Amino acid sequence: MAWQQTLKARWAALAPREQRSLTLAAAVLGLALVWSVLLAPALRTLKSADAQNALLGKELERMQALQTRAKTLQAKPALAAKETLQTLQTAATALGKNAVLQVVGEQATLTLKQVSAPGLAQWLTPQAGTGLSPLEAHLQRAGSNTEPLWSGTLVFRLPAGANAAP
């Protein structure tokens, strides 16, 4: 409380012109504080809102396209267990000697050796239509060619009964 009385005494001792100058300086500092804390961030947000809205719109369109694709894949009738295994075997044969398919129980493991990226992509694309997707993928880039070659394994889960004897 003593500091308040000291401050009031010093204020009273100032000339009216000095009091007006200090009041004006305090007002300018107060306005600068209000601007920097309240108004400037809000204006920055307002200016960037259109760009963010456009980005969110594109993201929404992409997610809706993915949703449509997922619904299409869900609506597709699943292949029978035997057909699924046959599809995998046919696709593995298409890769030639660079791929070996081993089926154990309800799991199929495709071992790849030096398969080109386009060849692997062409092989994986039809599998998406069957509802099969790799549970595990352990691939490594091999060779120092300009075109990358891939080696490794892809593990698939087969539907129940896919490996049953005829």
Image (cartoon, grey):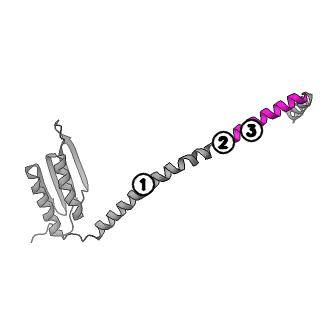
Looking at the image, is mark 1 or mark 3 nearer the viewer?
1
Quarter of the image for residue 94 reads bottom left
- Residue pictured at 15% horizontal, 68% vertical: 83
Where in the figure is residue 16, as x and y percent of width and height? 90, 30
Residue assigned mark 3: 30
The N terminus lies in which quarter of the figure? Answer: top right
Check if residue 148 falls in the magenta segment.
no
Which disc is residue 37 wearing? 2
Q: Nearer the viewer, residue 51 or 115?
A: 51
Sequence-wise, the earlier of marks 3 and 2 is: 3
Residue assigned mark 1: 58
* Dot 3 alpha-carbon crowd within 10 angstroms: few under 14, some 14 to 19, many 20 or more: few
Q: How far apart are the alpha carbons under marks 1 and 3?
A: 42 Å
For residue 25, side relative to residue 38 (left or right): right
- Residue pictured at 78% horizontal, 32% vertical: 25
Sequence-wise, the earlier of marks 1 and 3 is: 3
Image height check: is 123 above or below 12? below
Q: Amino acid at mark 3?
A: Gly
Q: Give the residues drawn in magenta, as a range.
A: 14-38
Label pair 3/2, CB-CB below 8 angstroms: no
Label pair 1/3, CB-CB below 8 angstroms: no
Q: How far apart are the alpha carbons under marks 1 and 2?
A: 32 Å
For residue 50, side relative to residue 85 (left or right): right
Q: Nearer the viewer, residue 88 or 69?
A: 69
Where in the figure is residue 145, as x and y percent of width and height? 16, 37
- Residue pictured at 30% horizontal, 67% vertical: 72
Residue 105 showing in the rendered view: yes
- Residue pictured at 58% horizontal, 48% vertical: 46
Judged from the image, the secondary structure of the residue bearing numbered disc 3 is helix
Image height check: is 122 above or below 31? below
The C terminus lies in which quarter of the figure? Answer: bottom left
* Dot 1 alpha-carbon crowd within 10 angstroms: few under 14, some 14 to 19, many 20 or more: few
